[in-house]
Image (spheres, rainbow, N blue to C red):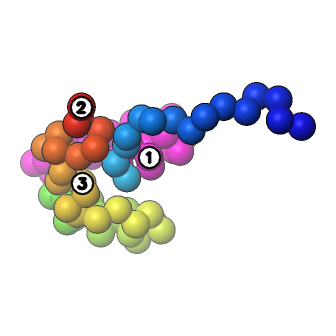
Amino acid sequence: MLEGLTPPSKARQCAVTKLLVTLSKTDKVILEDALANTQAWSSNGLSMSLKERGIILGDFTITKHRNKACLCFRS
């Protein structure tokens, strides 16, 4: 019954990374491209477009991830 029981991961991830790992390969590439393209996508614009598709990801969270100031990049 408890085969494969392992301790929880200590890896710290922000909401952006947590979302990315749940997406299909195609959707992951689309979101990664949008995150990288700050000229076409403001953080607020990306947040609103994701919300229209049922994905709640705040603009501040997106900005922190883009600036590498989120949990993903802290040591």
- Give the x, y percent position of residue 36: 21, 39
**Disc 2 designates what residue?**
75
Of residues 57 and 30, the one drawn nearer to the viewer in this rendering: 57
Does the stretch in magenta take in 45? no
In terms of secondary structure, where does tag 2 sit?
A: loop
Q: Earlier in the sequence, mark 2 or mark 1?
A: 1
Against 47, is 26 above or below? above
- Give the x, y percent position of residue 59: 22, 63
Say which quadrant the C terminus sits in. top left
Q: Is residue 5 left or right of residue 17?
A: right
Of residues 71 and 41, the one drawn nearer to the viewer in this rendering: 71
Whether residue 68 appears in this view of the structure is: yes
| Amino acid on which disc 2 is placed | Ser
Against 4, is 63 above or below? below
Label 1 CA crowd tier, 10 Å (few <14, some 14–19, many 20+): few
Viewer-nearest of labels 2 and 3? 2
Q: Is residue 66 left or right of residue 48?
A: left
| Amino acid on which disc 3 is placed | Ile
Residue stretch in magenta: 16-40
Q: Is residue 70 left or right of residue 9?
A: left
* Residue sitting at x 44%, y 49%: 19
**Disc 1 designates what residue?**
18
Residue 74 image label: none
In terms of secondary structure, where does tag 3 sit?
A: helix
Q: CA distance from mark 2 to mark 1?
A: 17 Å
| Amino acid on which disc 1 is placed | Lys
Q: CA distance from mark 1 to mark 3?
A: 12 Å
- Dots 2, 1 in contact, CB < 8 A: no
Q: Quadrant of residue 56?
A: bottom left
**Disc 3 designates what residue?**
62
Q: Quadrant of residue 45?
A: bottom left
